Amino acid sequence: MAKPPELVWLGNLTPKSTRFDDTYYSRENGLDETRYVFIDGNRLPERWLKGQSVTIGELGFGTGLNFLATWQAWRDTLSTPSQQCDTPSFTYISFEKYPLDQESLAKALSPWPDLAELSNKLVEEWKPNREGWLKFDFNSVALHLYIGDAADGIKTIPSSIDAWFLDGFNPKTNPELWSETLMQSVYDASNPEATLASYTAAGWVRRNLQSAGFSIAKRKGFGHKRDMITGSR
C-alpha cells in the first residue's frame, strides 16, 4: 500500500507537509513559480516549437501542479493541430513516495481555475493505491508515476529524460531526495544534452549535481527567493 502524506492546510488552501515541514508549492503563487522555475528554466516552449518531443522527469509529484502546468503550456505552445502532429506525444515521468488521496488532490488544485479542465481529468483517474509504476493516459499525454522511493523507481525508469524538474521538499528536511547517489542516478537516466531546473540553490545540492556530471548555473529565483539553479548534461 502507498504511504499517505501528513498534511495541514494553510489559510489559502496551500497544503503543507508536517513530515518535511514544507509547503507543496510557493505561497506567493505556486502556478507562476512552476512556470518560471521549471517550464522557463528548462526552455520547454522553445524546444517544443523546434519539434522536440521532450520527455520530462520529476522528483516529487506532490499535488501534480507541475504536471498540469506543463501539460497546459505544451498544449498552448503547440496550439494548432499541425504543430501537435509534429510533436505527437508528451511524456511525463514522476516519483512520489507519499501520494495525496483523491479528495486532497482535488482540494490542493482547486485554487487554480485556469487548470480546472486538466486537473479534473487527473483527479478523475487518480487512484494511487499501490506502490510501483502507474500509468495514466490522456490521449497524446502519458503520465508515468512511481509510487515509492525514487531511488528504487529510477532503476526501472521507462524512458530516458530530456528535462528534469527537481522539486523535492526543502533539502534541509528531505535530504534523501537530493543525495549524491540519487543525483548520479538522475544523470545516468538523462539523455545527452538533457537539462534540469530547481527552485533550490543550496550549495551541497549544486555540488552533488556537479559531481554527478551536470553543468550548473544560478538564476534569479522566483518571488522572494534570491537564487535558483538550472543545469545541463
Image (tube, helix red, strand yellow):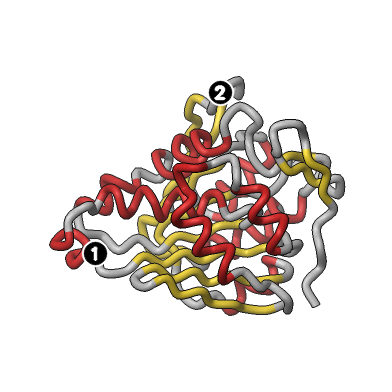
Amino acid found under the numbered disc labelled 2: Gly
Q: Nearer the viewer, residue 187 or 222?
A: 222
Q: Measure the C-alpha gap from mark 2 to mark 1.
A: 32 Å
What percent of the width, then of the height, locates residue 30? 57, 37
Q: Nearer the viewer, residue 14 or 91?
A: 14
Amino acid found under the numbered disc labelled 1: Thr
When the figure is inspected, residue 22 is found, relative to residue 163, above or below; the finding is: above
In the picture, measured across the screen, residue 113 lies left or right of residue 88, that is: right
Q: Quadrant of residue 147?
A: bottom right
Circle 2 SS class: loop
What percent of the width, then of the height, locates residue 224? 60, 20
Badge 2 crowding class, 10 Å Cα cut-off, few under 14, some 14 to 19, many 20 or more, is some
Badge 1 crowding class, 10 Å Cα cut-off, few under 14, some 14 to 19, many 20 or more, is some
Q: Which residue is mark 1?
A: 87
Q: Nearer the viewer, residue 149 or 105?
A: 105
Q: Which residue is mark 2?
A: 223
When the figure is inspected, residue 166 is found, relative to residue 103, above or below; the finding is: above
Which residue is at 77% across, 35% downward? 10
In the picture, measured across the screen, residue 2 lies left or right of residue 85, that is: right
When the figure is inspected, residue 123 is found, relative to residue 209, above or below; the finding is: below
Which residue is at 58% across, 63% downward? 123
